[in-house]
Structures are given as structure tokens and as C-alpha cells.
Amino acid sequence: MIKISSITNATKPYIQRFNKLCEKPYKALADFKIGKHRPMDIVNDNYIAENTKFITGLGVASIVLKDGVGCYMYVTQSLNNKEIPEDKRKFVAALDLANGGLMILLQLLMFFTISNKKVQEKMFNALFGKHFDRSASKGYQAMLKNNDLLKDMKGSDFHPVLNQARKDVKAAFENVTSLFAASVVAKRVFVPFIATPLADKTKAWMSRNDKPVEVSKETQNTYNTQKAGIDHKDVKSENKADQTKLNLLDKFKSSIQK
């Protein structure tokens, strides 16, 4: 079996070479300024303050950016797709635009809602609060007495460790729930129900400056839907013929009975 250490030693020169190639771009990005401020300083400060929340926000931002680029490409492709009939292209493009726009808006809405501290606190306490309450803390301390290395741990040493564990679990919970709500619930549950009805309104907005299409007299539909396909005169003549047949049949039956 190949040892992990041997793999690490084999790949180490390539990693060092890659890092050396990226030194200049990294330095240029770190020194880049907008006015008196460095964007990377803001990124570093936010990461240090709440690294898990920052990573979650970065993940959602990348998903939203990807959906925005995809929406633009789909709409452009639909408007210029010669395989789609010309009178249907705007509706297909409107459906793509409504779908993409809703995905972006709902993902941001779900992220800012689920990642809210009050919402996270309620959700976490409902699911995992009982594992970190007073009774659970006493149970953990009782379990430690059976461990020779930790049986002498005092409460002043134990509670900070438990609080840090709660904080780490809560951070992971926030990360998972925020990404799940943005990328699955918003994108796969809510958007399909709203995008299709909204496509008609989006099409109307996209066609607001279009000129009305003139219908050629040669291709204009002159069929009157209020008029039956059979002429009323023909129907009346057929009814008279049927009535005559019935009268003759009655006369024949009466002559036989006599």
C-alpha cells in the first residue's frame, strides 16, 4: 500500500512550483487599492471575524454569479436560436429570463433569511439545543469521571470547552442550512412554481416596444367560428326529406293494417 507520506513528498515540488508562480498575482491582488482602501483587507477582516459565515457567503455569491452568467447566455441563445419558431423565441427567452432572475433573487432572499442570527438560534435550539443544555452538561461531566485522564477536570475548565464545541457545531449548521436553503429550496422548489406564470408578463415587458405584426390578406384567417360548417339551408332540406320518409312509412303501415 502506498503511504501518504510518499505521496506528499512526490507532490511537494509541484506544489512549491505552483505557489511560486502565484506569488506575483497574489501580491498584486493584496496591494490593489480602490481609493485608500484595499479590498483584500476587508476580505481578511471579515474572514477573521466570522470565517464560517464568510465562506458560506462566498459560496452563495459564487452560485448567484454562475446563475447570472448562465441566465444571460440562455436568454441570448433563445433569442438567436433559428430552430425555435420566430414567434415563440421571445416566450422561450422570457421563460429563461424569469427563471434566472427568480433563482438569483430567491437564493439571496433565502440566504439572508436563513443566515440571520435569530433564525439560526431558533433552528439550532430546536434541533440540537438539548445536547448543550444544563442537564446534558451534567451528563457529560458524569461521563468524564469514568475517564482516568479527565476525571479531575473542573467545571471552570469543562464549560469553556463545551461552549466552544457548541459554537463550532452551530457554525457548521449555519453553513449547511444556508447553502441548502439557497441552492436547493429556493432553486429547485420555489422557482419552478413561479417562473412559468411569470414568463407571460416577462414576455410582455420584453415586447413592449415591438411593432404589431401585420397579417397578410392572403394568409388571414377568414373562418367564422360562429357559423356552423354546414349551411343552414342544407340542414333544412335534409330535415324535410327525413320528414317525408317518415310520412310515407306511416302511410304504408296503416295500409297494411287495413
Image (spheres, rainbow, N blue to C red):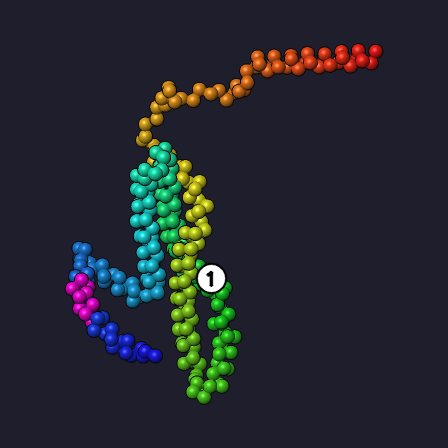
Question: Does residue 215 show up magenta in the picture?
Answer: no
Q: Is residue 6 visible?
A: yes
Q: Is residue 202 visible?
A: no
Image point (22%, 59%), residue name: 39
Question: Image check: 133 left or right of 113?
Answer: right
Looking at the rendering, in which quadrant would you find the N terminus?
Answer: bottom left
Q: Position of residue 66 (x, y in %)?
A: 32, 52
Q: Which residue in the protein does label 1 denote?
A: 123
Mark 1 surroundings: few (<14), some (14-19) or many (≥20) residues within 10 A: some
In the rendered picture of this protein, how many numbered marks are placed on residues? 1
Res 220 quadrant in image = top left
Question: Is residue 12 depicted above or below 228 in this figure?
Answer: below
Image point (43%, 85%), residue name: 150
Q: Position of residue 166 (x, y in %)?
A: 42, 71
Q: Which residues are magenta?
A: 16-26
Image point (42%, 44%), residue name: 195
Question: Image check: 17 left or right of 113?
Answer: left
